[in-house]
Amino acid sequence: MTMPNDDDDERPASFRREVGDALRKSGLGQVTPGEVPTARSLLAAIGGVRGLVESILPGLGFLVIYTLTHNLPFAVLAPVALAVIFVVARLVTRTPLGQALVGILGIGISAALALLSGRAEDNFVPGIIINIVSLSALLASIAVRWPLIGIVVGFLTNEGFEWRANKSKRRVLYLVTWLWAGLFALRLLVEVPLYLARQAEWLGATKLLLGVPLYAILLWLTWLLVRAVYGRIDTARTD
């Protein structure tokens, strides 16, 4: 029988630290559980002013151009051009490229699908797929009793999976995971019928409304709920 050594014991802790460090460098790291939520931190969590512009402007550009002209190539290629400008601007200012690269990839795929099919509503297929995958992942995590938000919070706080032994934390993290599942479910309930009805303009408008604004509201609510159990000393543990 092989006896465990110190390296084996250190691997899980090291993995938690690495994942936690990666999350803290992301936008989510700006909303550390237990801290007092501020507007500045919330803005940082959604990418700051630049992140807001990069998230909203391409979709707004598509909506305005397609509504006014119904010129599909122009409507889907204009956001691609904007995304390229965002990447170049980040290169020039030597700021992190992650968000801009993800944005140009998503916008490029969306534009390609719409141009290949000739259907403006296909510009929104990648977003619908992302919502389906996100909703499925959240519901699956709840079904197996490992709520995804709990896992993320555990890494952010360096407590790993200890929250599972705390009834108050566990209850709140289940609730918050359900709320995020509700966000993606709401998007699908609104967007899928519009897609099937080929209502590209309404899809563009609802995607903007159900995108960053709703995300920011839910992120703020998540922060408040999680802080309620992480912001006080609560050492009671139960199965």
Image (spheres, rainbow, N blue to C red):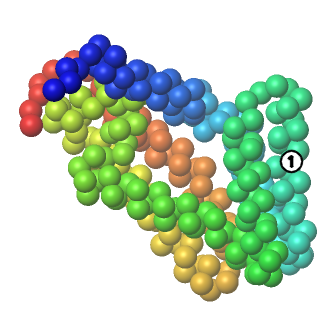
Is residue 224 visible in the rendered structure shown here? no
The residue depicted at 16 percent of the width and 32 percent of the height is 165
Residue 1, horizontal then vertical, whole percent: 16, 26
Relative to 11, 73 lies left or right: right
Q: Which residue of the protein is positioned furthest toward the top in this rendering?
A: 6
Relative to 214, 165 lies left or right: left
For residue 109, what is the image quadrant?
A: bottom right
Looking at the image, residue 235 lies above or below residue 137? above
Residue that numbered label 1 is attached to: 84
Amino acid beneath label 1: Val
Residue 65, horizontal then vertical, whole percent: 86, 67
Relative to 147, 166 lies left or right: left
For residue 208, what is the image quadrant?
A: bottom right
Relative to 41, 61 lies left or right: right
The residue depicted at 33 percent of the width and 58 percent of the height is 140
Please state, as top left, top right, bottom left or bottom right, where the C terminus lies in the image: top left
